[in-house]
Amino acid sequence: MEAINETTVAVLPSQSKPIRCIVKLGGAAITCKNELENINEDSLELVASHLRQAMNIGSCSEKVVSLDWSKRPGISEVSCNVDDFKDQFTEDPRSFVVVHGAGSFGHFQASKSGVHKGGLNQPLVKAGFVATRISVTTLNLEIVRALAREGIPSIGMSPFPCGWSTRHRNIASADLSAVAKAVDCGFVPVLHGDAVLDELQGCTILSGDVIIRHLAASMKPEFVVFLTDVFGVYDRPPAEPNAVLLKEIAVCEDGSWSVVQPALENMNKQVEITVAAHDTTGGMVTKISEAAMIAKLGIDVYIVKAATSHALRALSGEVRGTIPDDWLGTVIRFARY
């Protein structure tokens, strides 16, 4: 599927709080991608903890007060002690926005029905649209709950009911006012890739990576972090022997990009990228393309493996500027020369 790449109509936010960071939580990083609708609970829990620390909510020594007061499978009681909140949120946390991919949620339903190709008048496509949204919103709820258990005041926001739509897979409308209002009120909006209406082909899939780029262009965060299931961008699929991690990529005004670190022997070598057959949103191809467009805005993008110390350092802003030698990840920046 081709990436959605141009914004034609948008309702821009009236935003007073500056955004520290927009985080893309990759679906493959927090789900078991080869197991239908299966969350990687350990990874998601650690990611939520890292986000809490990066947002400066409480401290490592303080008790984490859960905001999830709903019943969980296997747990008999709901934890809610009003006394725990007497000294909470005394400090204004850093403003973050989270966008997550679908992983093992949604992609199967979308690819089986062809939602990404349009044709909403066809019974199979309409059924797939419904099934895809059930799946991705289920994952969204579980991510919101995981963040809430870490004391993060997260609010799930689905693009379809929030007024996002496309025209031939290009963004036609995107109302960001609710997102900006949520941030100003001290919440952390949690958006996700979604099935949306398309003015010409009926419907399509709006990927989280495209949402990230649109949010970055409108809300101007200090930096953007992509949390993935690999350490960053490699010169070939990372599972292949001798794959090289590209630590810094420079993006030029014309959209072309080059590797700054490390110095590759063949600078003209094409970086090889693979996309899973069931992925209806373009996989790593879309991720790099959208990251490059964000970098052209003057916003640094960090691609790093989720649930690692390297991810926490990126989320906390510790690797901005000169890249530490011991940090594993990829920085994509605008070439300022």
Image (cartoon, helix red, strand yellow):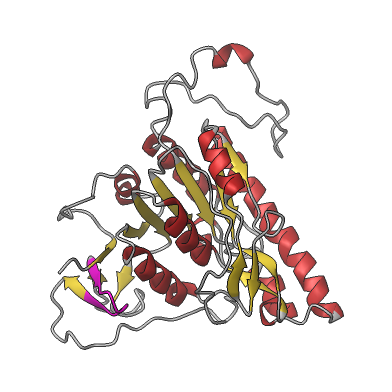
Residue 256 is one of the magenta-drawn residues: yes
Where does the N terminus fall, quadrant-wise?
bottom right
User: Foreground: 257 or 56?
Assistant: 257
Side (left or right) of 26 relative to 193: left
Image position, residue 9 (x, y; %): 58, 66
Residue 306, placed above or below residue 261: above
Side (left or right) of 107 relative to 270: right
User: Foreground: 89 or 293?
Assistant: 293
Where does the C terminus fall, quadrant-wise?
bottom left
Residue 83, placed above or below residue 1: above
What residue span does the magenta drawing correspond to?
248-258
Side (left or right) of 312 relative to 219: left
Q: How many marks?
A: 0
Residue at image position (40%, 74%) is: 289
Residue 201 is one of the magenta-drawn residues: no
Image position, residue 160 (x, y; %): 69, 60
Residue at image position (48%, 56%) is: 215
- Residue that lies at the very extreme toward the right in this rendered image: 123
Residue 144, placed above or below residue 26: above
User: Foreground: 314 or 254?
Assistant: 254
Image position, residue 139 (x, y; %): 64, 53
User: Foreground: 262 or 165?
Assistant: 165
Image position, residue 186 (x, y; %): 52, 32
Side (left or right) of 194 relative to 63: right
